[in-house]
Image (tube, rainbow, N blue to C red):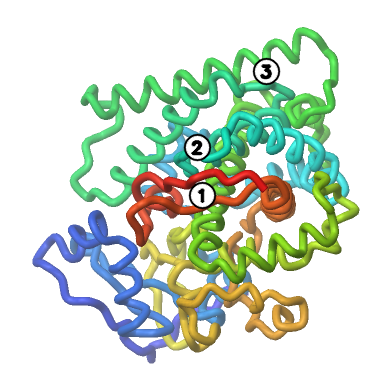
Amino acid sequence: MLSMPSKTHMPIPSLPGLPLLGNVFALRKERVELLMRISQEFGDIGAFHFGPRMVPVLNSPELIHQALVDQAAAFARTKTVRALGTPVLGNGVFLSDGEEHLRQRRILAPHFQHSRVLHYAEIMTDCTSRLQETWKAGETINLADEMMRLTLWIISKVLFDADVLGEERELGEVLTYTFRHFADAVTNPLRLPQSWPTPQNRRAHQAINRVNATIYRMIEERRQSGVNRGDFLSNLLHAQDEADSTMLSNQQARNEILSLFVAGHETTATALTWCWYLLSQHPEIYARMREEGDRVLAGRLPTMADLPNLPYSLQVFKETLRLYPPVYAFTRGAVVPVRLGNYYIPKGTSVVISPYTLHRRSKYFLDPERFDPERFDPLQEKKLVRYSYIPFGTGSHICLGMHFALLEGHLLLATMAQRLTFEFVGSGPIEPEPLLTLRPKGQILMRVRQR
């Protein structure tokens, strides 16, 4: 039930800003710093101004629970995100709301059940092992690029049963440009319509057309053959909505597949890059993770059966997601007036939820800037305040691929730690670059040491 606003409410504190423009320049150039400043100055809730409009940032488990769970019906994807995202992703599960979103989740959710996800473990370890063989001992690699290659390869095998190792660089560059264009547009109050033939818009259209051509070709080939190859695309094309027995059209299948392709590629690659960088800066944690793998695996590739005996590797991955959640911030728009705690949110107001700032509040995480996988020791993890750790979101829009991402991160860390060590040789420290995901800025140069 929605909580209707009362006549008495507390004002939402906000940062000072420029007339008419508000905090737009900081939002575009120093987004993470802006969000952290709000968190540090105001705590549970504070606001910035996007042009003349006030944008509250919800920064406590209680307010986030109210907005995303208790009163989720009062919030929807913002008009700006839908307008900019729909040309890329269509009305897929990541942009839809209401009954359409529930229908899409009914169709997709069975494919992300834990038992289904376990089937992909062998693909993950096989791709990782094969990629490692392309690195020479003592070679310096840009780890960010290599993790993008790896996760693109894995998600392509899982979704399409396709081996794209030879064309991953082009697809990666296409997706990267699309993300940059989206991130720039969503924070620009003076953006030109996407239909205008500016050089940036033309290049963005060309980029998404390149991806569309590949996906539609795969869909049509699968329809024509009628063969279920056991991959996600085959299963999706044969799936029916249990409520009305309808099947997906080619366009609907494209929307869902592309959404999963983008999420399964970009977010995990970003998290893994941060993870190896953090390990390279904390040799004692790196050594403990390797020792665990040596003791359990003795040089062989991990299997699903091994993962319960490799808990520290998963703790390392979860702690990385705390410090550098790939989806570092997201928005919701109030479709009706709503009261959150003691604060009134008018209809049409966009609110921001930032896992990045929430995960760095000392109220919920002692010494929050410290990289400490012990926080996610099973006994310690149970003590976390509910909704204080949300790298995958929460509520009805919680990430469908959460189990897939945790399995992938766990397996890839254990697999690579068995065979090699990464030695950071870049000029650190590395700063975050907030695009569509929270990427490390610049190249992450690592020297590969064979073990």
Give the Cα distance between marks 3 and 2. 39 Å
Q: Earlier in the sequence, mark 3 or mark 2?
A: 2
Q: Residue at x 22, y 41 (%)?
A: 191
Q: With respect to residue 283, does 171 lie above or below?
A: above
Graded by Cα atoms within 10 Å as few (under 14), some (14 to 19) or many (20 or more), the crowding at tag 2 reads few
Q: Residue furthest left?
A: 19
Give the residue pinned by disc 3: 219
Q: Residue at x 53, y 43 (%)?
A: 266
The residue type indicated by label 2 comes to Glu
Crowding near the residue tagged with mark 1, few <14, some 14–19, many ≥20 C-alpha atoms within 10 Å: many
Disc 3 marks which amino acid?
A: Ile
Give whichever of discs 3 and 1 has the lower sequence position.
Answer: 3
Q: How far, Cα to Cα, is label 1 from label 2?
A: 21 Å
In this rendering, the count of numbered labels is 3
Can residue 3 be seen from the camera position used here? yes
Above or below 381: residue 165: above
Q: Is residue 339 visible?
A: no
Mark drawn on residue 139: 2
Viewer-nearest residue: 71 or 93: 93
Say left or right for 305 vs 66. right
**Nearer to us: label 3 or label 1:** 1
Query: Which residue is the site of mark 1?
Result: 270
Q: Nearer the viewer, mark 3 or mark 2?
A: 2
